[in-house]
Image (cartoon, rainbow, N blue to C red):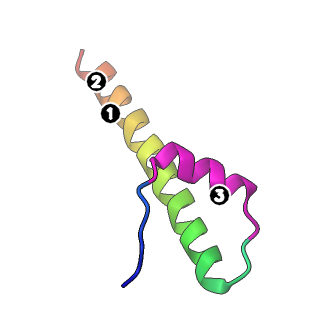
Amino acid sequence: MKNYEMITLNDYIENLENAKCTTVAQKDIEEKVEKYLLNVQRAKTNAKVIEALLA
């Protein structure tokens, strides 16, 4: 049985900034999280642009 620990997204991001990737899998996860966060930011920006165009 594996023990898992809950962590907030903010804490996870801070841990990523301080961590050194030692395996390909860790690097892959880090890249996917960064890509996801970038896409979230783009979506927010796009929503603001659409909102401004419709206003």
**Exactly how many numbered labels are in the figure?**
3
> Residue 49 lies in magenta, yes or no?
no
Q: Nearer the viewer, residue 29 or 7?
A: 7
Classify the position of the C terminus by image quarter.
Answer: top left
Badge nearest the viewer, 3 or 2: 3
Residue 41 lies, in percent from the top left, at 47, 41
Mark found first going from the N terminus, 1 or 3: 3
| Relative height, residue 7 to residue 48 (above, below) | below
Q: Give the Cα distance between marks 1 and 2.
A: 6 Å
Q: Is 42 on the left or on the right of 54, as rendered?
A: right
Q: Residue furthest top?
A: 55
- What's under tag 1, amino acid-wise? Ala
Residue 28 lies, in percent from the top left, at 58, 76
Q: Which residue is mark 3?
A: 16
Q: Nearer the viewer, residue 20 or 3?
A: 3
Secondary structure beneath label 1: helix
Q: Residue at x 41, y 69 (%)?
A: 4
Q: Which residue is mark 2?
A: 51
Q: Residue at x 59, y 66 (%)?
A: 30
Q: Over which residues does the magenta segment extend? A: 7-20
Q: Which residue is mark 1?
A: 47
Q: Is 15 on the left or on the right of 48, as rendered?
A: right
Residue 23, quarter of picture: bottom right
> Residue 15 lies in magenta, yes or no?
yes
- What's under tag 2, amino acid-wise? Glu
| Relative height, residue 19 to residue 48 (above, below) | below
